[in-house]
Amino acid sequence: MRVRHPSWMEIAFQVLAVLLLVVFILDFVQAATAVACGQQGLEPGSNCYPWGAEGPAAGYWQYRSKATYLISCILQIAVLLFAFAVPFLVKRAIISLGLMLLLILPSLLILV
């Protein structure tokens, strides 16, 4: 099987996917070591996340528990890795670009 070389537009989307990967991996590492913000005895400015029904993120399903948040981060990282590999797996550039856009756009919306 011959591997197709990505176009410049696909490379731009791959760079975006890598940047998002870095953000989500750093977020995963920070969240894995964080504690809930509602715990007693936390110092101001400490490393905490709003797990459960507290804070401004109370309505989002990812924040219901620490385990749920970490699993959603892992799934998002897997999707971004797949988005990076799409140009090598799909023969036509237009299909590759559309699929990459569908995979990367939700990641951008999560960050906003």
Image: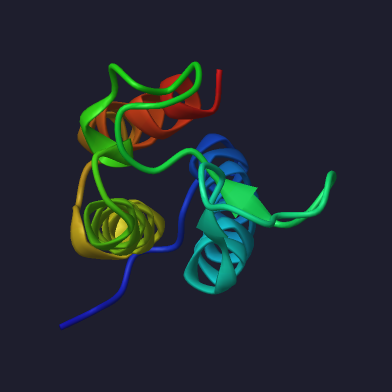
For image coordinates 60% across by 42% down, the residue present is 16
Image quarter of the C terminus: top right
For image coordinates 48% across by 38% down, the residue present is 50
Q: Position of residue 57 (x, y in %)?
A: 43, 23
Q: Is residue 27 above or below residue 106?
A: below
Q: Position of residue 18 (x, y in %)?
A: 58, 57
For image coordinates 52% across by 52% down, the residue present is 39
Residue 46 in which image quadrant: bottom right
For image coordinates 31% across by 64% down, the residue present is 74
Which of the colour schemes (rainbow, by chain, secondary structure, one colour) is used?
rainbow
Image quarter of the N terminus: bottom left
Q: Is residue 44 above or below residue 106?
A: below
Q: Position of residue 10 (x, y in %)?
A: 49, 42
Q: Is residue 30 above or below residue 7?
A: below
Of residues 109 and 7, the one nearer the viewer is 109
Of residues 33 and 28, the one nearer the viewer is 33
> Which residue is the extreme one toward the front?
40
Residue 4 in which image quadrant: bottom left
Q: In this figure, what is the number of numbered marks?
A: 0
Q: Position of residue 37 (x, y in %)?
A: 56, 45
